[in-house]
Image (cartoon, rainbow, N blue to C red):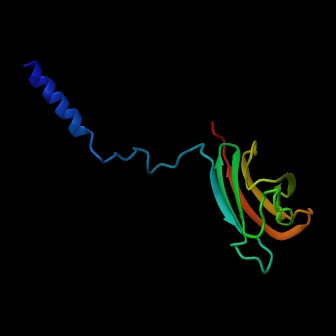
Amino acid sequence: MRKLILALTVLVAVSGCGKKIPEPENSGVAMQGVSTLKAATTVSSIGNSDEDFRVKTFVKGNSVYVECYLKNYGFSESNPEQLATVSVFIDNQKKVDMKTAAFILKDVPNGMHKIKLEILNGSGEKTGLQKEIEVHITSSI
């Protein structure tokens, strides 16, 4: 009798572990308190294509994760004539100059913000490459 109950229990447990994963109950409900990337727009100088400067962003909490892809510039000190610096502006106020392709903007206040990224060459002169993105930071509480 014990073997029969044990066999049935194992059979029920194994049959319940199929490949189909159930959908979450709240899949149609908008999640509250989650930061999202609201919109992304491009502002570039004439003559520069989107392949010259691309940006990927991800918003999590009050931080914005940024990745920059540059065609003709780099962030390595080994090639000083193509060295790039990213000037970061939030709501038209300069915040920081970054010397890496990927970085995090921390403690961005709640609300809609316009982030402008402008590429400077090794001499600190504007290259004409720039991007603007809008992000919406919401409270994670």
Counting from the top left corner in percent of width and height, residue 120 is at: 86, 63
- In the picture, residue 17 is in which quadrant? top left
Question: Is 38 or 131 nearer to us in this picture?
Answer: 131
Q: Residue at x 85, y 70 (%)?
A: 127
Identify whether 11 is placed above or below 2.
below
Q: Residue 118: x, y in percent? A: 82, 63
> In percent of the image, x 43 and y 49: which residue is there?
27
- Residue at the far bottom in the pictured view: 47
Residue furthest to the front: 78
Quadrant in which residue 92 is drawn: bottom right
Q: Is residue 8 above or below residue 62?
A: above
Locate the N terminus and report the quarter of the image it occupies. top left
* Residue at x 79%, y 67% (from the top left corner): 130
Dividing the picture into quadrants, the one containing residue 83 is bottom right
- Rendered residue at 72%/76% (across/down): 49
Is 27 or 47 nearer to us in this picture?
A: 47
The location of residue 6, given as percent across then percent down, is 15, 24
Q: In this image, 44 relative to 21: left or right?
A: right
Residue farthest to the left? Answer: 1
In x, y percent, where is residue 60?
64, 45
